[in-house]
Amino acid sequence: MIYIDKMETNSKKPDGAGVPGCRPDGSPEEIQHYIVQKLDIVGQLAGGISHNFNNQLTGIMGFANLIALRAESDNIKKYAEEIIGICKNAGDMVRELLTFARYKPMTAAVLNVNSAITTVTNLLANSIDKRITISADLSAEPCNVFADAVQLQSLFLNIALNSKDAMPTGGKLAFSTKRVEADAAPCGYVRIEITDTGHGFGDDVKARLFEPFFTTKAQGHVGLGLSSAYNLVSLMNGTIELSSEVGVGTSVVVTLPIHSNAPCGADAGGKAAPVRRHEAAPDGKEKKSRGTILLVDDDSCIRESLSAFLRGDDYSVLTAVDGLDAVEKYGKTGGDRIDLVILDMVMPRMDGKEAFVKMKEINPSVKAIGITGYTNYTQEEMAALGMKRMLHKPFAFEELSRAVAEYVQH
């Protein structure tokens, strides 16, 4: 069955009702405009919901991290780590929703395509029907692309899961990569092909596979898999092509530009700063502070959990409930006594960007890390203002510890 949100055109409505401005034939251009409008609405809803939801996840994850750090029982520590894992998975789901809503990735880095595919095939091997044989011929070298790690894996996973659904009684799922030379890309492209031996489909279905909300599955499936894949590839400046034959199977080919000049991120060998177990100072003596941090967030759970962690890691912490409060407290110190500001980007009264700009007026060399569950401000835009680092909620204490260590010298 096919669903596009029960869309109707003037060709079905004699009174001219339906999509505003549609001609009686309901042309593809008008239908595409309608879909874009629907995506804009989805994007607005996704942004607002994700901000609040990620704040909740960050608070839960923060307190679970504290329990894990302070637990004396291995079982309690294990349970806390399970909660942390669930929060990470939930955060990834929110990011996929934002990706579908066409928001740009916030944690892009140079990543190895072969490694991403290996991660996906390992996941599939432990989760899909054992009658489906998975193979991989990953010969592309080099195969580094500039992308978000979660989104890159989601791209391959979305395509593979569609293949899985096309093989209800088993079959073959194959991944392959190779390097392709092209004038349009100085370093060439990496060509990723994912093929299956499923039931396939005809041209009438193929023409609509990348439409949002289109699905050939039973009612209850929203049909975002391949449309999400299309959006992901577009964000990475790549292309996606699909061929299929009924009774033979389907092949999806993704080409992504190889990136070799940007500084490597996830695959660069960088290691997270170790998170120290929170312990009391010997003989009851007060520990020497490693630096002073101003923590700014309008969510009380986030302020409490993060400040507890930072204090336990020997930092002195001041807190502020919004941007206006933060600027006032920062101004009282002249900025000289605060080594780092951790600044939420979406807050009432004054948001993170405006607060950061006003702090720079007080102290041009202010150091700040942005934290956000969703924001219209891009990493590049904030970096141009002087905020070199942003963390996406929910984040682990290890990630926060690493970011803080980059700015506060011990």
Image (tube, grey):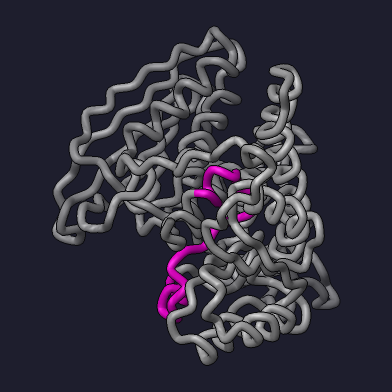
Report the span colored magenta. 380-401
Q: From what the image shows, is residue 204 above or below residue 391? A: above
Q: From what the image shows, is residue 121 above or below residue 25? A: above
Q: Is residue 56 left or right of residue 47?
A: right
Is 388 colored magenta in this rendering?
yes
Please tell me which residue lies in front, 292 or 159: 292
Q: Is residue 214 left or right of residue 205?
A: right
Locate the C terminus by quadrant.
bottom left
- The structure residue drawn at horizontal position 69% and vertical position 22%, both measured from the top left corner, is 78
Q: Quadrant of residue 89?
A: top right
Residue 400 at what x, y percent from top left?
55, 51
Residue 72 at what x, y percent from top left?
72, 23
Residue 43 at what x, y percent from top left?
67, 64
Q: Is residue 212 left or right of residue 136?
A: right
Q: Quadrant of residue 114?
A: top left
Whether residue 238 is visible here, answered yes or no, is: yes
Residue at the right extreme?
15
- The structure residue drawn at horizontal position 22% and vertical position 28%, both measured from the top left corner, is 139
Locate the N terminus by quadrant.
top right
Q: Quadrant of residue 280?
A: top right
Q: How many marks?
A: 0
- The structure residue drawn at horizontal position 39% and vertical position 31%, both measured from the top left corner, is 117
Please tell me which residue lies in front, 331 or 28: 331
Residue at the top extreme?
131
Residue 27 at what x, y percent from top left?
60, 69
Is 99 colored magenta in this rendering?
no
- The structure residue drawn at horizontal position 45% and vertical position 86%, both measured from the top left corner, is 364
Whether residue 214 is visible here, answered yes or no, is: no
